[in-house]
Structures are given as structure tokens and as C-alpha cells.
Amino acid sequence: MYNEIKRQKERYMSEDIQTQRQTQQEMMRLRAENASLRKYVERLQQTIRGLNDLHRSLDSITPDVDVYNLIHELLNHAIAAVGSENGSLLLLDDDSGELVFVDVIGASRGKLMNYRLPKGIGVAGDVAEKRQPSLVSDVTMEPTFSPMVDKHTGLQTKSLLCVPLWDGKRTIGVIEAVNMSTERSFDTDDQEVLMLAARLVSLAIVKAERVQSQ
């Protein structure tokens, strides 16, 4: 009888220790997740403030204002907000239908500036034609993805987020964010942030065109 009670006690103690370990591991995981989430929210808030400041700058666009620098800042803020270190602004060449890399954030800048994508090629081409955003978690599963840019740069695209730029019925181009800088995947919140940036970039381009034509 004593031995049976002893075995039961040892079993309960073992189960209790295992439960405590599992609880501690879960608490550590939640702390790490909360810390990561706080950093993301702080970065997002900082970016939104930056975008708001740049939005106010649109009202002061004149022929003397460096619109390219303004757009570069918009792109920089947006790419950082979605947790990526690589992004591009591609504008539509109305004559050829090609998308032209006019601004690039990240390691591919040297190779991609002024690089041209043929009409309708890749996720960017598809987004420009349909004027609908595309959130791709795994490019190997995306039928519209083209390896053309990767072959040109030597880098590997794993995931991407692409949103259109437009003014009324006119397509202006697209903004792309490529590969997350953390384990987190692009999500619909990131898409909303990039769409906001796209609207601001579109406004800046259209207003600059109007100012220059005066």
C-alpha cells in the first residue's frame, strides 16, 4: 500500500513539474510575442506620423520643391512600416506600357534603378493592369510571379506585397514591398499601410505634374 501511494505521489509530482514547465514556456513565448508586437505597433505609429507629416507637405508643392525626395521619403516610411527592407516604386510608361523602377529601397537599388518590366509581366504587371493589390506569402505558389527581376538582381524573392497607384481612370504605377525582415508574414494591415502610402504618392505625382504644367 505504501509503495502504491509513493508511486502515485511521484507520478503526480512529475505531472505537476511538467505542467509548470509547459506553463513557463508558454509565458515566455507570450512575453516574446508581446514584445515583438509592441515594437511593431511603435514602428507603425511612428510611420503613420511620418506619413501624416509628408501628407501635409503635399500642400506646399511648388516648382522649386524636390518632389522626388518627397516621394522617396513616402516610400521609405511605407516599406519600413510593413516590416521590410526592400521596396520599389514603379511608374507606368504610357507609350510602351512598361513599368519602370524609378525608386528602389534596399540592396537591389543599384541594379534596379530605371530597369523596365515588359507590360503585364509579374505580380507588378498584374496589379497595374487590374488595379487591385496583391499579397503573396509564397511566390512559388503565385502563378503571376515572374523570376525576371530576381535573375537580374541575383536576390531571391520569397514573399511580396504590391499595391497600385492611380488617379481616376488613369493607372500611374505600383509600389512593391519584398520579403519581410522578420519571421512575420505580410498581412492585410500591411496592405492597408501600403495602400495609404500609394494614395499619397499618387497625389504627389499628380500635383507635381499640375504644378509643372502651369
Image (spheres, rainbow, N blue to C red):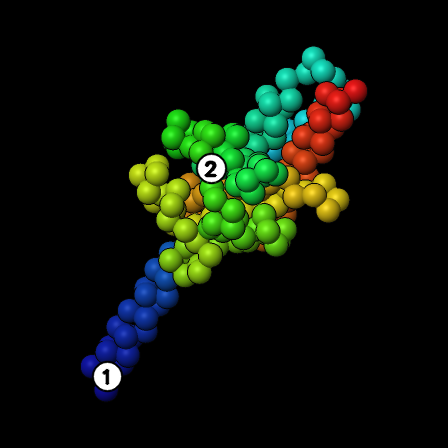
Q: Where on the picture, by quarter, is residue 89?
A: top right
Residue 104 horizontal side relative to residue 170, left or right: left
Q: Earlier in the sequence, mark 2 or mark 1?
A: 1
Residue 38, position as x, y percentages in the image: 54, 42
| Residue 172 in sight here | yes
- Judging depth in this view, the residue of 209 and 184 nearest the camera is 209
The residue at 38%/58% (across/down) is: 140
Residue 194, position as x, y percentages in the image: 60, 42
Q: Where on the picture, by quarter, is residue 130?
A: bottom right
**Residue type (three-letter) at the residue carrying disc 2:** Arg
- Judging depth in this view, the residue of 196 and 25 nearest the camera is 196
Q: Which mark is residue 4?
A: 1
**Residue type (three-letter) at the residue carrying disc 1:** Glu
Please identify the residue farthest to the top as the structure is shown.
64
Residue on which the image places disc 2 = 116
Which element carries disc 2, helix, strand or loop? strand
**Quadrant of the frame with the N terminus:** bottom left
